[in-house]
Structure formats: structure tokens, C-alpha cells
Image (spheres, coloured by chain):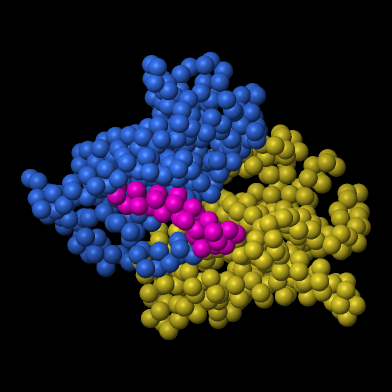
Amino acid sequence: MQVIFEQIINGLTIGSFYGLIALGYSMVYGVLKLINFAHGDFFTVGSYLGYTVLVFGSALATSVFGLWGGIMLATVLAALGVAIVGVLVERAAYRPIYASGRLPAVVSALGASIVLQNLIMVIWGPRYQAYPANLIPNMHLQLFGFNITLLQMVILIMSFILMLVLYFVIQKTLFGAAIRATALDRDTAALMGINFNTVIRFIFILGPALGAVTGVMVGMYYRQISFTMGWNYGLKAFTATILGGIGNLPGAMFGGLILGILEMLGAAYISAAWKDVFVFMILILVLIFRPTGIFGEKIAEKV
Amino acid sequence: MDYKSTSMSRLDQKTIFIIIGGFVIFPFLVSDYYIDVAFFFGIYALLGLSLNIVLGEVGLFDLGHAGFYAIGAYTTAILNTTFHIPVLLLLPVSALAAGLFAYLVCSPIIHLKGDYLCIVTIGMGEIIRLALLNNPFGITGGPNGVFGIDSPTLGFFEIDSSPKFFFYIWTVVLLSILGLIRLQKSRIGRAWNCIREDEIAAEANGIDVRAYKLLAFVLGAALAGVAGNIYASKLMIVSPESFSFLESCLLFCIVLIGGMGSIPGVLIGSAAISLFPEIFRPFAMYRMMIFGLAMILMMIFRPGGIWPRKRGAIERSGFPLSTLRKQRSLANP
């Protein structure tokens, strides 16, 4: 019981990473019908930016803002930086291609992914980088007799808040309404006076910023980051997107959480080496029996 | 009715002769290194042709094609090193193994559309790679792979040097191209293209969509299996890292950069993918970045590929495909 609970907590932590990255995929897919292969690399760039701020600015930041202030500063700076990268990539690699259909955009996205990955390698070097140790005090909290580390609590709460904020932005604000309208029907939305390019730019600010925050959290959780990790996380997050029903935001988040829990339980009870095989098997089985994902077409409209 | 005008085909023949002539004398002029580069160009061409059947002809998004390639390579490697069956004899065996695997795996997923099929094939490719990495029953050698694969031998003639491998792969590519051109013009090829253009219309016309899609996957996988066999016999070692997701992505790009469903396009695309990193070697760590930039620029300026397939052939025979598509896209954007 103890082990299952702790594995579920571990799974939720990893799952919230997948979920937050999946939100970016899902938003872009909802509006553009484009699988944004570069999204995993936005996440990596965020992780590296956070690393730079924490390593080189940590003394200054923590003395001025305190420990939590320093971490917050790193997260916000990473999110801002990656939002800029996201807008630039959209402007340079995607916007010129919208008119020519979906498949050229896939190649362009793969190209953007290769460029970003190698840019990171050129700037930060090809070797693994490590986040500062014990950034967040290594404390264990007792919750109903089970252990949770403080870091896991922070990650879970933070991703929950981000998810709520995103949900609020999409559902309650004017910008969110514009995004939903564009996802439903681009031409009609344009006739109603919604500027398609502005909507896209907004999405390419939100998605990459979320990815960057996830990147910093992954850096703090695993401490080790490499320039190729975007592929792996991107692939899992995309799996989560499909699992939850593509274009469906709450679905993407739940898909991520389910994926994380399955992965951790698979690692604990079946085999650690085969856990990814297990994850992809589940994905294929779900798609065979529910070809639109677990929550596809069921929860709400597509964004 | 002959679709091509005669002057066009004569010009084509002349160019083809020049290109083939260039290929024949090429290995006698340059060092083994460049011959090997040309060999890998051939491997990518064969893989590109195999993916072109699935992606180009039928329009099925397959981002796990490296998995079939891996099945072919590992079938050859394992059977050759444990049972010492000659590699050349394993060529059809690898093709059969990859084809059979594609049939078993794709049968339950063939009804999926577009991006869902795409993610399932990604998952399949990853499962194959991870399975090879995890060394099931101790036969795949884990991360180290399988090594000590023999060279292909035909009687006393052993294909063991770079120029011999060069001629070997390009002979296979040439034969495949001849076969695929025949296939494109056959009933099967027309049915495939019909499915690509409009699946519902194809089904309404009595085409068994499911069977033809499966056939495309099986044939594509079998050809990739052949490429795997030749790759294994050339390198004498196979390891899981050669069959990563990136490899599948590169194959996908070969078909799209060249032009969907176009055989000359596939050759150009595979040349771009395999020669580009060699040409830009002096740029060292910037070269992959330039490669990615080139992919983006390529799609901005030639979204249909470098050598897109001409539609004229079908249209002139009285079935105006492009007009039909235009009307559909107006009615149903």
C-alpha cells in the first residue's frame, strides 16, 4: 500500500510534467492542426535558461529575493525567454507555410526542432549540465502516514495552479474566446474580426512559456539536463495529448497524469527497463478501441 | 494510350543514361570514403522508396518506418551469426520477416486516420527500438547490438569492398525503381493514389481500402527489410541506435523534400539527406543547425518538394483530379 501510494505520487509528478508540455501541443494542434515537433525543444531551452539563471544569478537572486524568490525569478525569466523563442520560431518557420498545407509544416517543425536542439548544443555545450544541488530543502512531509518530498509538493501545486490559470484564460477571457473560435472554424472566426495571426502568436507565447516552466521543474526534480531530452519528453507529452483526445485541454492534462502513473506503476511492478514499451502498448490499445482518445469528443469543445 | 510525349521521354532517356554512366565510373575516380557516402545515399534511397509506397502513394503517415528497417537488419544479423545462413539467402527472408511483422502489427491499427495513425506508428517504432535495447531472450545483444555479420557471397564472388557494395546497393535500388514504376502504373498504384486523394470516393468505387492500405504497409516494410539486410551486411554490426525516432523522421523528410509519390523526388531527397551533412562537414558543430535551417527554407520556398509528381497522366485520361479537389475544398474547407 505504502509503495503503491508513493509510486502514484511519483507518477503524478512526472505526469504533471507530461501534462504541462502536452497542453502546448494540444493548443497548437487545436488551432493549426499541426504537430509542433519543436515543442519538446522549447521545453529544453526553458530548462537550460533556468539553469543559467540559477547557476550564475543564484547568489544575487537569493540574497535579494530569498530562496523561493530566486527560483521564481528563474522560472519567470525562463518562461519569458522561451516565449520569445516560440514567437520567433512561429514567425520564421511556421507562418510562411500555413497556406501550403499540413505536411510541409511537419517537415518545417522537424527542421525547427533540429535547429533548436543544435543551438542549445552550441551555446551550452554537448555535455550534461546539472542544476544546483538541494535547491529546495530536501524535506519529507508526512501526509496520512505517507512520505512526500517538499519538491514534489511544490511541483504538484504549481502545475495545478498553472492548469487552472490556463483553463481560466481559455474559458473566461476574450483572448481565450478568440482561440476557441479559431479552433472551431478559422474562416468564420476571421469574419467575426478575429486576427488569426494574433491568436497564433498568443498560443506560441502560452505554450512555450508553459513548456519552459516545466523545463525548470524537471531540472530541479532530476537535476541533470541534456540538450537531447526534448525528444523524449516531447514524445511522451504528445502521447499524452493523443491519449486525452487531441485538441482537448483538460484531456491533455489528464492524459499526462494517467501516462505518468502508468509509467511509474509499470516500472515498479513489471520492469523498469520495459516501462516505455508498456506506455506505448497502452497508447496503441487505447487508440485501437477508442480511436479519438480517452476523452475525445466527450469533454467539451476543442481548443 | 501513351501518357508521355515522345520528345520528353527521349530527353529523359538521355539524362538517365548520363546519370547511370556517371554512377558506373564514379567508384573508379574517388576514394573509398566517398564511395561509402554514395553507398549510404543508396541505402537512404531504398528506404525512401519503401516509405514512399506508404506515405507518398497512399498518404498514410508512417513515422515508425525505421522499425521495419530494424526488423530486417536484426533478422539478418541474428540468423547469420547464430545459424550461419548466407547473408544473400537472408535477403528475401528479411523482406518476408519485415512484411509479415507489418501485416501483424498494422492489421489492428489500419483503420486509424491521419495523426492518430502517425502517433501509433511512432509508438510501434519506439517499442521495436526499446525491445531491441532490452535484449529479449538474450538474442539482440542489448545496446551493443549483434556483430560479426558475414559479407554477402554469391558462389566464389564475395561482396567485401566498398566499390562492390556500391554496385550491389545501386543495383538493388535500380531494380526496385523499375518495379515501383511498374507498380505505380498498375491497378494497385491507381487504387493507392485514389485512396490518397479521397478515401470515401475510393471506397464508393469498390476499392477495398483496408486491403490496399495493408498491402502498402507490407510492401513498404518488405523493401525496408531488404535495406536492413544490406545495411547489416555492410556494417557487419547492428545496434538499436541506428533505428531511432530521428531516423524515421529523416525518412519522412526524404519523401516530403523530394515530393510525395515521386520516385525521382525520393532520389533527390535521399541525396539531400545523406550528402548534406558530408558537404557541410567543415562547419563542424554548426552543420546540423544548417541542416535544420535548410529543411525549413526548403518547405518555405518549395512546399510541394523539389521534384513533385506530375498529375497530368491521370487528368488527361479524363478524370480531372485537381478540379475535383478544388471543388471539394471550396465546399468543405
Q: Does A166 sit left or right of A129 as displayed?
A: left
Count the marks: 0
Q: Is residue B20 magenta?
A: no
Q: Nearer the viewer, residue B247 or B271?
A: B271
Q: Nearer the viewer, residue B243 or A90?
A: B243
Q: Which chain is blue?
A: B
Q: Residue at x 51, y 23 (%)?
A: B150
Q: Residue at x 91, y 55 (%)?
A: A140
Q: Which chain is yellow?
A: A
Q: Does B323 sit left or right of A274 as displayed?
A: left
Q: Residue pushed farthest bottom?
A: A193
Q: Does B68 sit left or right of B177 as displayed?
A: right
Residue A142 vertical placement versus A183 (above, below): above
Q: Position of residue B146 (x, y in %)?
A: 59, 28
Q: Position of residue A185 (x, y in %)?
A: 41, 70
Regarding residue B220, the answer to whether it shows in the image is: no
Regarding residue A273, the answer to whether it shows in the image is: yes
Q: Does A174 sit left or right of B114 as displayed?
A: right
Query: What's the magenta bit mostly, secondary-structure-wise?
Result: helix
Q: Residue at x 90, y 57 (%)?
A: A138
Give the quarter of the image for residue B315: bottom left
Q: Is residue B283 magenta?
A: yes
Q: Residue at x 60, y 72 (%)?
A: A85
Q: Residue pushed farthest left?
A: B1
Q: Position of residue A223 (x, y in %)?
A: 79, 57
Q: Position of residue B177 (x, y in %)?
A: 29, 39
Magenta segment boundaries in residue numbering: B263-291
The quadrant of the rendering that contains the N terminus of chain A is top right
Give the quarter of the image for residue A219: bottom right
Residue B278 vertical placement versus A193 (above, below): above
